[in-house]
Amino acid sequence: MKSYLLATLTVLLACCYIGTVFAADSDAGEMEMLVFPEAYKAMKVGNGGTISGVVKFEGDVPEKKALEITKDKQVCGADEKFDESLVVGEGNALKNTIVYLIDISTGKDFDKDAKVEIDQKGCKFTPHVQIVPVGERLTMLNSDKIMHNVHIFSKINKSVNKAQPKARRKMPLKAVKKAEGPVEVKCDVHGWMSAWISYVPHPYFAVTNEKGEFTLEDVPAGEYKLGYWHEACGTNSKAPVAVTVEAGGTITQNFTLKLK
Amino acid sequence: MRIRTVALLLILFGMFGVLSLTYAQNAPEASEKGKQVYENSCAHCHGTEGRGDGSAAENLLPKPRDFTRGLYKIRSTGTGELPTDQDLFDIITEGMPGSSMPPWDTALSANDRWEVVAYIKTFYDGFKEAETPPKQINLSGKVPYSEQSVETGKALYTELGCVECHGNIGRGDGTSAPDLTDEWGFQSWPANLTQGWNFRGGADTEDIFKRFVGGLAGSAMPAFEGDSFPGFGLTAEESSRMIELDNKDEMTEAEEEESAQLYEKYDAAVDIALNLAEGTELSAEEKQIYDDAMKVVYEKSWHLANYVKSLMPEKRPEPAIGNNVLRSQYIHGELPEMDNAAWETLEARYFPLVGQIVIEPRQFNPTIDAVNVKSYYNDTEVAFLFVWDDRTHTTDETDEETGKTLEDALAVQFPAKVPQGPTAPKPYFLWGGRLPVYLWHWKASAPEQVTELTAKGVNNAEVQEAQGELKAQATYTEGQYKLWVKRALKTEDKKDLQLDPGVFVPIAFSAWDGANGDVDTKRVMTSWYTFVLEPVPSSKRFIYPPVIALLSVGFLFGLRAFVQRRNSEE
Ligand SMILES: [Cu+2]
């Protein structure tokens, strides 16, 4: 009887305080995502071409935002930390941009020896943007010897929230089955820690370095759409750049990005 | 013949039972009926599309579950697994304490609840795509509660980092607590482990074990399953040795080799656990390694669950009504100061606080559970000790929306004049109205000060001109406030409440958690309770009234006799 009343009361209350219905922003959400081919087949690529270039930032560079270190100051606050959602280097070079082929369906296999790792050092994820092949394990390192928790906000794959206690130096995570991304990685213990990963089905993804440079190698000759993603500048998924790669050739494609 | 038919039928039913058990999912196929029940009873909060965005969702925190991602906090299954049908059915039936989700055990028939289970599963494709039923957490190795188990669990509580959010002694006041959000970006406070009655999924040791091992999907609470434990695959001794070696500044060659060997064993076990999670078939030998490793880990998890269980009372304290009315105890001489051990001999009275939702601004998502009160008095004064849990110590924060200053606070409310008799009207419980109330208002920013107010409604409160009659001391430690207040029983101020032993006085409380946005009427509070200075018959001061009464009676008799004599003389 009591719970019936409670239930009715809650619903009544609910009716009384009709708020605004959340607007569905699935459109905006999709625009922020990478685009993957329906299927991808790995094969040996002989005499492939290379796409390289530089990504630059256009506009007034906002002042670097210092992160507020609220706990574990000895480990986390040894040096000043800045928000990494926009890292602009010399000559407006834009770091941490993913540049990739949108519509490739056959090409080389992943480099199986490449380490897929993110370190938690000084309560900061390094690198800030990481590419994770579908079917491979992302290994989380803990150089800090303090507690972190790896919280991956996946939506297509199951989200992950796994404790990494101080004594857990190296924690490989279960491989995922579906391409997805980018998704944010956070640490709830240190709310300011943030990184982005993408689970990708093929190896034609690059992340720009501090000089804004990227290189995609061993691309089979052909025509492709070249896409990018940047945390603060968004994507060109709606209007990717068309490129033509010739066997053994090298093409240069630069990008200039603005804040979204 | 008939017997044989019955036997055959029984066997058939038996087989059916076994068959349905192998896939322990008991919800029917989704139907129009389930949709109907959902739309009538659930959609207001959870939305017609199951996105947790119903018309009432805006005011609620924790937010109504978004069913489209298949993330459920309260499960009997491991991390990354979907809940079982039974899990969903149980949540609907029992509700979620501490949230707006009520129990539906009487409002909906069991049949309707099963229909709803089937229907909400249609919001997430993962249920349909799943090839095998979700893996349930194995509860068979339960370690019985013992002091030793609690000790072991306590060490793990620190080692595994539980303190970061739940605080040193579990009051949800860890250093990460104020910054936690769920995957939808909404504030999510860590559980106060000393208040099991507010646990969403129950507070039996088994419940605690399941939450710890499986995590609370979508929240900040991670899963501590299997290889989360440092030294997974090692025996308890080996893993402490591994950590010991890790913490050495320098290792000898032999030690380095020892460490490397331990790590090799550890990495191999982790690899096996991941293989299994990824769906790889294990060899018999690997299976053995995995089972042994899980046995060690689960044993540790039971110790941890036992420790958490030890932090809370067996059940929620009874509210201060009936036999539990707040009785101030008489004491000879000086009243005890805040730190005096005399307070420990008194049992506290428990006043549950609820969010104020009568007038704007309202508090739909309270964070303070209750205030616990003790009191002593002597011939001239009364002292109170108020104790309440608050995850954060907030003295000066600015509300982003309103620009108002937020801080923790407590108010004790009495009627300005004691109602004459139990049926006499009391002032309106929300800071009075036509009948005024007399208030003590304490704020965390000025911990040694209590302000006296007279109020005829929340927007009609006045600071009394005469102040300074109250003494106060306060502390905040490990997520808990202690406030000590002392006042004279009788004061000169006409606006003050005057106190007499044996008189039942209405009392009520309001509390504010600044970090939860509490300010003005956005607060938690109680309605009227009762407080009394417990008369002590043996005490001298209580001999006087009967003596006076006797004397008066004697005087009356005398008077009558005198009058009678005079009358007769006339
Ligand atoms: Cu961290």
Image: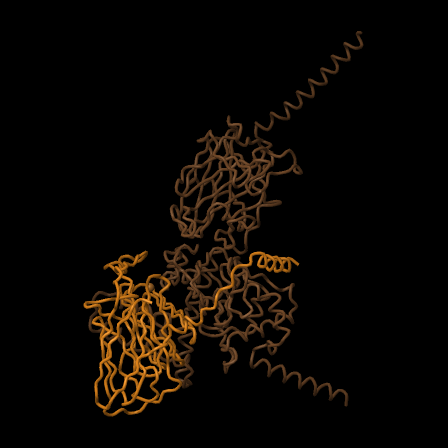
In the picture shown, does residue A14 fall above or below B505? below
| Chain B as rendered: colour | brown
- Which corner quadrant holds the C terminus of chain A? bottom left
Q: Where ligand 1 lies, by image quadrant? A: bottom left
Q: Percent position (x, y) of residue A100?
A: 30, 79
In the picture shown, does residue B427 fall above or below B116? above
Q: Percent position (x, y) of residue B150?
A: 44, 60
Q: Is residue B74 visible?
A: no
Measuring 41% from the left and 58% from the top, which residue is drawn there? B166
Q: Percent position (x, y) of residue B51?
A: 51, 68
Q: Is residue B321 left or right of residue B299?
A: right
Residue B118 sits in quarter: bottom right
Instruction: Single out the residue that lies furthest toward the top.
Output: B570
Q: How is the protein colored in the picture? A: by chain
Residue closest to the eye, A11 or B312: A11
Q: Percent position (x, y) of residue B196?
A: 51, 58
Q: Which chain is orange?
A: A
Q: Is residue A140 visible?
A: yes
Residue closest to the eye, B344 or A249: A249
Residue closest to the eye, A186 or B540: A186
- Which corner quadrant holds the N terminus of chain A? bottom right
